[in-house]
Amino acid sequence: MRKKVIVSVINDLVTDQRVNKVCQTLLTMNCDVLLIGRKMRNSPELENRDYAYHRMKLMFEKGPLFYAEFNFRLFFFLIFKKADMLISNDLDTLLPNYLVKKIKKIPLVYDAHEYFTEVPELVNRRHIQGIWKFIERKIFPNLTDVITVNDSISDLYYNDYGTRPHVVRNIPRRSQSLRTATRKSLGLPDDNYIIILQGSGINVQRGAEELVEAMQFVDNTILLIIGGGDVINLLKDMVNKLDLKNKVIFKPRLPYEQMMQYTAVADLGLTLDKPTNLNYKFSLPNKLFDYIQAGIPVLSSVLPEIEKIILKYHVGDFITDHNPRNISDKINHMLKNQALMMKWKKNCSFAAEKLTWENEEKILKEIYSKYV
């Protein structure tokens, strides 16, 4: 008999590849999957999925009233739906899932995609941060199965609660057909280098502002920014003020396969988060693995989890700080050193065989198989 699994996440589902991959993994385990998220006013339509999904339309889209409404609505949705297992993604969906688990006595798996209570949006808002920490402190020690995205965040949770989460990194599936598009078909120039910064969370303290400023000093290169975030409008203003319209191209959030077409024709991938909070310091962004799967070298800030991957597989280099001049010097040096670029690209091909969701999901299947 097929088991019913309800997966909850607070975003609009469009670009959340981790949750999509989890749902696909559950399908291979002969489960009926229902994914719950929300739909905002500017949310793109969702492409067809192999599993059921429901996006709640809410009165509020941000702030305390949004979180209260979402959690209230999610609780009543879950309480009236039959399920054999619940999966909660991140702290902002945990409370209603935990309450339903207790009431209906069904298993709950918690997947923490980040060290939530230390995200920059909460670090300087002590009262709000305290509420989330209270919720986490009351529930986390009572959870049986917890998953997170890397060893450093697993260590942080172990130090906090004495429970060590399983680690399942957010790595893409092994791609077989990335290079089907050309620069011309994508509307990109053939006579320049292309560097790319992608992500659905291009926010403050992630190095994007300094990168745009650095483009004043980068030779024969286009910066392609794909995604959304709270600094996108600021970046566009900077491009206008610095007269960089011919050197920076913006693309909105795109379906994953389409985004990867752009990534695959780039020369260099960038991930420049700053270690200004614990969540960013110990992050392991999925864009790193997207770049590797696309076969392009990586330029990164020096963060522990990213550094481990780049040094282990020799797929790129690092900036020493976020001074725009130093960033531009490093980009120019990497792009002009073709022998080194070819070596990094070759190493990306090797790393892409090892760093796949097909390997990571084995851990998930061990956990889920206890319940389904």
Image (tube, rainbow, N blue to C red):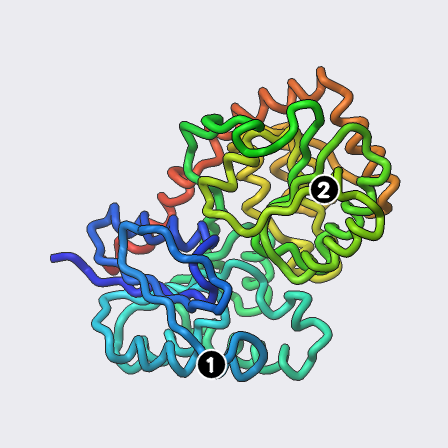
Residue 325 showing in the rendered view:
yes
Asked if residue 153 lies left or right of residue 222, the reply is: left
Q: Residue at x 66, y 72 (%)?
A: 122
Residue farthest toward the top in the current orientation of the protein: 339
Q: Residue 218, position in %: x, y?
A: 81, 34
The front one of 180 and 318 is 180
Asked if residue 55 lies left or right of residue 211, the reply is: left
Q: Residue at x 71, y 62 (%)?
A: 277
Q: Are marks 2 and 1 in contact (CB under 8 Å)?
A: no
Helix, strand or loop at mark 1: loop
Quarter of image, res 221: top right
- State the CA–CA distance, disc 2 to disc 1: 36 Å
Name the quarter where the C terminus is drawn.
Answer: bottom left
The front one of 145 and 314 is 314
Quarter of image, res 57: bottom left
- Residue type at tag 1: Met
Quarter of image, res 4: bottom left
**Would you name the residue on which mark 2 appears?**
248
Q: Residue at x 29, y 82 (%)?
A: 103
Where is 18 relative to 88, above or below? above
The front one of 233 and 11 is 233
Residue farthest toward the left in the current orientation of the protein: 1
Name the quarter where the N terminus is drawn.
Answer: bottom left
Mark number, residue 59: 1
Task: Please tell me which of labels 2 and 1 falls first in the chain.
Answer: 1
- Dot 2 crowding, Cα within 10 Å, few <14, some 14–19, many 20+: many
